Image (cartoon, grey):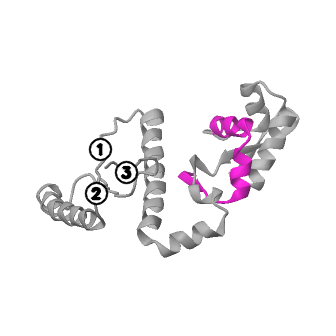
Amino acid sequence: MKRIESVTRPEALQALAHPLRVQILERLREPASAATVARDLRVPRQRVNYHLKELEKARLVRLVGERRSGNFIETLYEPVARTFVVSPRVAWAHPRRAVAMAEQFSLEQLVLLGERLQRDAAVLLDRAAFEGEQIASASVEAEVRFATAQDRAEFMKAYLAALGPLLKKYGTAGGAPYRVLLSVYPDPEGEPRE
C-alpha cells in the first residue's frame, strides 16, 4: 500500500465527498470486509458494501483477499494508500487557469510547491499520529512589502546569495534530508499601503 495518494481525478474527489466513505477509508487502515466495517461503524452492511463498491470504482480501495466467515466468504478491502490528499488542480476545471499556469512559470511552481508541501505535511502527520514519531520541523512565515518589481528582484537575488553559503556550511552529503522552501508572491488578500 502506498503511503499517500494525490486525488487528481474528479470521480475520486466525488467519491470522497461522502462522509461515510471517509470513515470507511479510515477504518480500512487494516484490510477488512464490509461486515467488519459495518459492525465497527454501526451502520448496515449493505450501506457499507454500496459505498465500498463506489470507492472501488473510483480506484480508492482495492480487493486484497477473501476469508471464510461461517457459511459466507467475505471480501477484504484496503485503501490504495494510507492517506489521501486532494490536489487543488482537480477542482480547477476552468481552462483559463491552465492557460494562466502555462504562461506564468513561477505561478505554476507556487501551485506545485503548495501541493508538494500539503503531501509532505500529510505524510509527516501520519508518521507522528500512527507511528509515534517525533517530527523535527520548523516553519517560518513573513510578510514583506516591495515598492517596485526591481525591489522584489533584488530581494530574491540577495536571498539566494545568502542561502548558498548557509547550505554549504550546514549541508552535508550524508545525514537526514530536509527541504527548504521560499516563495515570494503577492498576498491575495493584502492591500497595498502608501
Asked which quadrant contains residue 141, the reply is: top left
* Residue drawn at point x = 39 percent, y = 56 percent: 186
Disc 3 residue type (three-letter): Pro
Q: Nearer the viewer, mark 3 or mark 2?
A: 3
Q: Earlier in the sequence, mark 3 or mark 1?
A: 1
Q: Nearer the viewer, mark 1 or mark 2?
A: 2
Asked which quadrant contains residue 157, the reply is: bottom left
Q: Give the residues in magenta.
A: 1-28
* Residue drawn at point x = 76 percent, y = 26 percent: 39
As rendered, which of 154 and 51 lies closer to the eye?
154
Left or right of 96? Residue 187 is left
The circle on residue 140 is 1
Q: Position of residue 133 (x, y in %)?
A: 37, 36
Q: Which residue is mark 2?
A: 146
Q: Position of residue 150 (x, y in %)?
A: 25, 68
Disc 2 residue type (three-letter): Phe
Q: Nearer the viewer, mark 3 or mark 1?
A: 3
Decide: marks 1, 2 in contact (CB < 8 A)? no
Q: Position of residue 154 (x, y in %)?
A: 21, 66
Q: Secondary structure at mark 1?
A: loop
> Residues under labels 3 and 2: Cα distance?
10 Å
Disc 1 residue type (three-letter): Val
Left or right of 75? Residue 29 is left
Is residue 62 in view?
A: no
* Residue drawn at point x = 31 percent, y = 42 percent: 137
Residue 31 vs 163, above or below: the answer is: above
Q: Is residue 66 magenta?
A: no
Q: Is residue 24 magenta?
A: yes
The circle on residue 192 is 3
Q: Residues within 10 Å of mark 1 (few under 14, many from 20)?
A: few
Q: Secondary structure at mark 3?
A: loop
